[in-house]
Image (cartoon, rainbow, N blue to C red):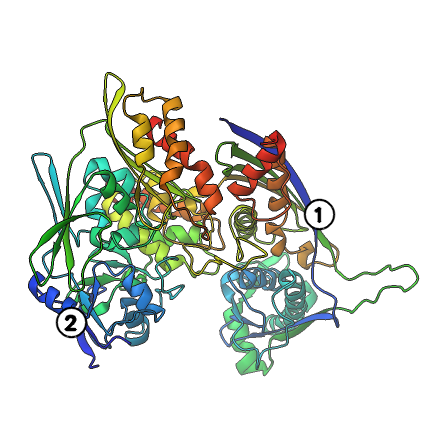
Amino acid sequence: MITAVRIPGSLASAAEYAAAGGWIMAGGTVVMAQVNNGSVDASELISLRAAGLSGIRVADDMVHIGATTTFREVAELEFLADAVRTIASPSIRNLATVGGNLFVPQPYGDFAVCLLALDATVHIAGSGENRAAKVGEPLARGEIVTGVSFARPAAGTWFYRKAMRRKLNSAAIVAVAAVVHTEGGVVSSARIALGGVAPRPVRAVSAERVLVGRWLDAAALDEAGAAARADIEPFDDAYASAWYRTRVLPVHLRRAVLR
Amino acid sequence: MAIRRGRGYAAVNYPTGMNLGGDPSQALIHATTTGTFVVSLSSVDLGQGLKTVVAQCAAEVLGLPYGNILVDTADTDTGPHCMGTFASRGTHRVGNAVIMAATEAREVMLAVAADELEVDAGDLETDGSGFVQVKGAEQKRIHITDLALAAHFKQGRTISGRGIFLKEKNDPVPETGEMDPDSCQAHACTVAVVDVDDETGVVEVVTMYNAYEIGRALNPATVAQQVEGGAWMGMSHALFEATEPYYPARSHGPADFSEYLMPTAADIPEQHSAILERPAESGPFGAKGIGEMTANAPIPAIANAIYDACGVRLTAMPFTPERVLRGLDALTGG
Amino acid sequence: MASTVVSLRLNGRPAEFLARPGTSLLSSLRDSLGLMAAKRGCAQGGCGTCTVLLDGRPVMSCLVAVETIEGASVRTLEGVAADDGRLDAVQSAFLDGFATQCGFCTAGMIMVAESLLAGNPDPSRDEVVEAISGNVCRCTGYASIIAAILDAARRKREVDVV
């Protein structure tokens, strides 16, 4: 039963409440659903709405997104617009935040998959010192994500595809986010993140190893996709089975890159 | 890797009403002092448009504008009895009951007018815009508002009517099994065109063609809605919905509308619908009704289209991408 | 567990009400303010029947903790028609296009359409489809709703030209 909703006006104040055991809430799209069905353990909610954590800053090619920035705003970053529009629905995206998306389990959490592919830094504040971490690292009690930052990928190097059971507003069967550099058509580096195929976003390191030094073509991608099966821990859920996700992973990797 | 297109069809005969202990509905009509005719029912309009077609039936029989009819389905405690809104029975049973009630009310209405105009009731007609007038001498007329006021405050009469439609219980002939449990049957056929992605098993319904023979389309707009909405529901059952996705295991049953899959506006096919009318003797103005049947034919039509597209014969719903892929594997021995 | 006094600008007028901790905007609208157009379909953000406009943008009101939107502007279906009851272009288009059956999704659909057309007077069919992708309809199969929203856009453009 919720006994209070705190709306701290600063990060420091929010961190204090969090250290005291309050339940952090950004956009509310996950937490309020839990409140509505009575499954929130904590009795105090801490809304980050007024803590000054929203906004997008771009300087040189570094992008910094505040943790409470909504996906509606993130879609203004052109290269991410297509990816953002696969997340839930517009009425959810007007509320849901980048920070919150880091902590939802797969097959949700598509933006975390993007951030993993982008090698994003996750900025964390708490009662101790501020620190930087990578996507997927756990937080200590009382810590709050304040934002994420990453280098904007060069034109033509960013790839994203999310296979879903329906065309819009549906969770990932397989999500592929990748930054792939080529020189003269040969892959010089690849950073591939997968969603929907493990409890957390995963790096398809086996696929990356196959691709480096190869032409970026269907044959290489098929081989990379098959290799990527070593990197996943697929599960059954209401959307698809582990068998199915494993089976179509290479297809969606290929289609993500070759469109 | 290919997108394979296929076409399939299925047809359905759909009975109106039910048998059980007999299938009745009642209706009462009375005029207010200013000429609104209230149709009292216990029947429920869930959004299928029963109140609309009932008002149309009453208006048609009374010879009054649709706007003069007020349908009141407020209270099953106090309203005239109805078995309920199911078995695609609403238009047929309730429509017939309303026609009967309106027929009686019209007789009284004309009798009141006859007294006011000092003519024979048999010489009167309604003009459809609210007037009761003398045939061949339209300037001799009275408006329904004045007529209703006269009935209440001058003549001391109630302009009202009672109606009931009963389809009697029908038992089979023991020797032959012959029986007559329904009042009429509507017929439909759906042709579905699908694309099957043979690398992912994803089925997309591209187009659905629907032909429905329903006796009479009392309201063509709501009929078209029912056909399209039902076809969507059929497609949803065929390709998406499951409460036990791993049946007979009960695991991973959907817990919310994110997990309980239903196609969005982005997943709908193009639809083309044709309505045919062969009036049923027993129906209100010949209508047979068009209810649950609209979700039926699309499902086997889609199954047949999948078979046509890629040779996979699926017999368990939903026809998920996994089932299609496993079917393709079985065909290629893979 | 004291309630909070929340003030909003609701359908153009100031509104003030009590909210217990953790109450959603949807619950406040329906249970405290008597505004029943927004529906409680799932309380999980998955159906869209609770959609209202928050500072002009469509949101799932079941997922908004009402205490966190103190002072915001909220618009519901009850605030769409003119004060004299005249229906607006979206409402008229829905009616004329038979784009409703049971009506449960209708309030949410109309609010999404209001917001879409305010920012985009000439949306493509794809844009309409994306806008309503969070709104479940069980009855119509969506085609009549899409057509009604495109029709409403056309009606509004004609009025503006005149």
Instruction: Classify the position of the C terminus of chain B by image quarter.
Output: top right
Q: Residue furthest right?
A: B175
Q: Label 1 amino acid?
A: Arg
Discs 1/2, front: 2
**Residue C148 in sight from this viewpoint:** yes
Q: Chain of mark 2?
A: A
Q: Chain of mark 1?
A: B
For label 2, the residue is A20
| Residue A116 spot, x, y in % from top left | 24, 42
| Residue B53 spot, x, y in % from top left | 57, 59
| Residue B312 spot, x, y in % from top left | 62, 36
> Residue C95, located in which quarter of the rendered image?
bottom left
> Viewer-proximal residue, C146 or B30?
C146
For label 1, the residue is B278
| SS assignment at label 1 | loop
Above-or-below relation of A195 to C60: above
**Residue C84 in sight from this viewpoint:** no
From the viewer's perspective, tell me whether residue B301 is left or right of residue A179: right
> Residue A164, located in which quarter of the rendered image?
top left
| SS assignment at label 2 | loop
